[in-house]
Amino acid sequence: AFWPGYFGDASPLKVPASIENLKIEDVAESALTSTLEWMRGNGRSVVLLGPVPTYDANVPQVIALEKITGRPLLQHKTLKDQKEKNTFFYQSVKSFQKNPSFVFLDPVEWMCVNYCEVERNGVSLYRDKNHLSITGAMAFEAEIKFGLGRVVPIASSVFDAGSKAVHIDKMLN
């Protein structure tokens, strides 16, 4: 999900005018929390993928313009920038992180060392300003596989996914 879109002014979630002093981040936190609790309450282990660094401009276009003009144009983000931008989201998932049936994967941590990575080997990791390209997603395959390997089943290793029984050990291979 584009988490800043839910925990900010551009959120598709709407607060009824009749409820005074309620902030959009409270609505988003409540919705996320109730969804995660519902999943766990129904015997599901939860893997939540956090935000990727986001930009104000189309990253591949800006990278191309930088190469053409030879001038730096993209305002590179830092780990601190991205953590601050997603403060409400990180606060919302904090209480779940102590539960073994909940795994939180944080691309911001993977992508931002000094500055947030936007390209690798001359290829953009983004397809626009806030979505990874296939190359970008595949660049973090090892981190995702490692995170999925940390999943701890809640009650049993089998759950019903629609009409098919799925074994968690087969999902991880």
Image (cartoon, rainbow, N blue to C red):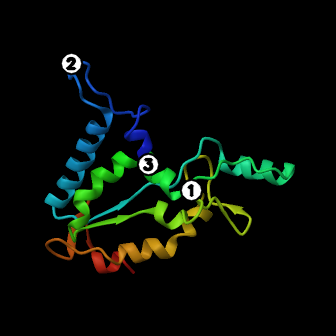
Residue 163 in view: no
Which label sits on residue 132? 1
Residue sitting at x 29%, y 55%: 93
Q: Position of residue 66 (x, y in %)?
A: 79, 51
Q: How many marks?
A: 3
- Residue type pointed to by label 1: Leu
Mark 2 vs mark 3: give the one in front.
Answer: 3
Residue sitting at x 40%, y 36%: 8
- Residue at numbered disc 2: 18
- Residue at numbered disc 3: 84
The one of 20 and 58 positioned closer to us in this rendering: 20
Instruction: For marks 3 and 1, give the CA distance.
Output: 20 Å
Q: Position of residue 42 (x, y in %)?
A: 15, 59
Badge 2 crowding class, 10 Å Cα cut-off, few under 14, some 14 to 19, many 20 or more, is few
Residue sitting at x 23%, y 26%: 21
Residue sitting at x 13%, y 72%: 155
Q: Secondary structure at mark 2?
A: loop
Q: Quadrant of residue 105?
A: bottom left
- Vertical placement of 91 versus 164: above or below? above
- Residue type pointed to by label 2: Ser
The one of 102 and 115 positioned closer to us in this rendering: 115
Q: Earlier in the sequence, mark 2 or mark 3?
A: 2
Mark 2 vs mark 1: give the one in front.
Answer: 2
Q: Position of residue 112 (x, y in %)?
A: 54, 62
Q: Secondary structure at mark 1?
A: loop
Instruction: For marks 2 and 1, give the CA distance.
Output: 38 Å
- Residue type pointed to by label 3: Glu
Q: Position of residue 151 (x, y in %)?
A: 29, 73
Relative horizontal placement of residue 19, taking residue 144 as reference (left or right) = left
Badge 1 crowding class, 10 Å Cα cut-off, few under 14, some 14 to 19, many 20 or more, is many
